[in-house]
Amino acid sequence: MPELPEVETVCRGLNQLTLNCKIQGGEVLLERTLAYPVSAQEFLEGIKGCAIARWQRRGKYLLGEFSQNSGWLGVHLRMTGQLLWTQQDRSLQKHTRIRLFFPDNRELRFVDTRTFGKVWWVTPQREPEEIITGLQKLGVEPFSPACTPEYLAEKLQKRQRTMKTLLLDQGVVAGLGNIYADEVLFKSGIRPDAIASTLTFNQIQRLHRNIIEVLQTAIDKGGTTFSDFLNPLGVNGNYGGIAWVYGRTGEPCRTCKTPIERIKLAGRSTHYCPQCQN
């Protein structure tokens, strides 16, 4: 599933490519991709003639704000979603779900193999949180001033959950997922199955610092492509080539050469170094 660095990469790409271009029309090829409104006709009529003034990211959500207070376009890529900026006459990818047409023969395609991704049109005079209710449950953004070691300490105290599952909780830190939770815990020297309430404040400070550093490095690399992720121009992310532990089961730790191990925590594959994270 695309995580914060991948969604941020898409957001930045869309801000470079799609701003101030009026939507001339579109096509909904799979209606269940629409979360709101559920009617393809209502969705297409509502966004026709609108131009996106800016894109922003909230957790793993993409929010395109239309100019002149004409609403918002919301997207969640889920597991396999892609937003691709392409020519209208280019052959459709097999799993194209929604097409939005722009001037100069351009279009924005939502491609999604597993069909878990969702798209919303937030009608004018409504706030995105009213329609995209998942936004209401998100915790702080990692790069925001509100994400401090003290905030993390408050969230960890008295929690009997493992650190891996806690970092995956979008109500704690928005945008972290399976890949970067593993990376952050490795860089912090914390076992993924450590109980949250047992961490010292020094460990929490290290955790806070590495959340920011790992995510920024991944953004700089354009995210991670292990299966489906592409940026809007169809380019892979490059973080996977420098990952510390994720996807490296049995390979030597980049620090101590101990083989990286993989375990299951809360049903998720979890990678760690038994020597560096003890």
Image: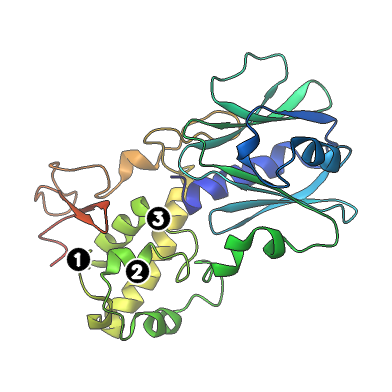
Q: Where is residue 37 in the image (x, y as percent from the top left)?
A: 73, 47
Give the secondary structure at mark 1. Answer: loop
- Report which residue position mark 3 lands on: 177
Q: Where is residue 240 in the image (x, y as percent from the top left)?
A: 35, 40
Q: What residue type is labelled 2?
A: Leu
Depth check: 214 or 41 in front? Answer: 41
- Report which residue position mark 1 lands on: 191
- Report which residue position mark 2 lands on: 166
127 w.r.t. 235: above or below: below
97 w.r.t. 87: above or below: below
Mark 3 neighbour class, 10 Å CA radius: few under 14, some 14 to 19, many 20 or more:
many
Q: Which mark is residue 121?
A: none
Residue 241: in sight, yes or no? yes
- For discs 2 and 1, the disc positioned in front in the rendered view: 2
At 61% from the left and 39% from the top, the residue drawn is 33
Distance, label 1 to label 3, CA atoms, is 16 Å
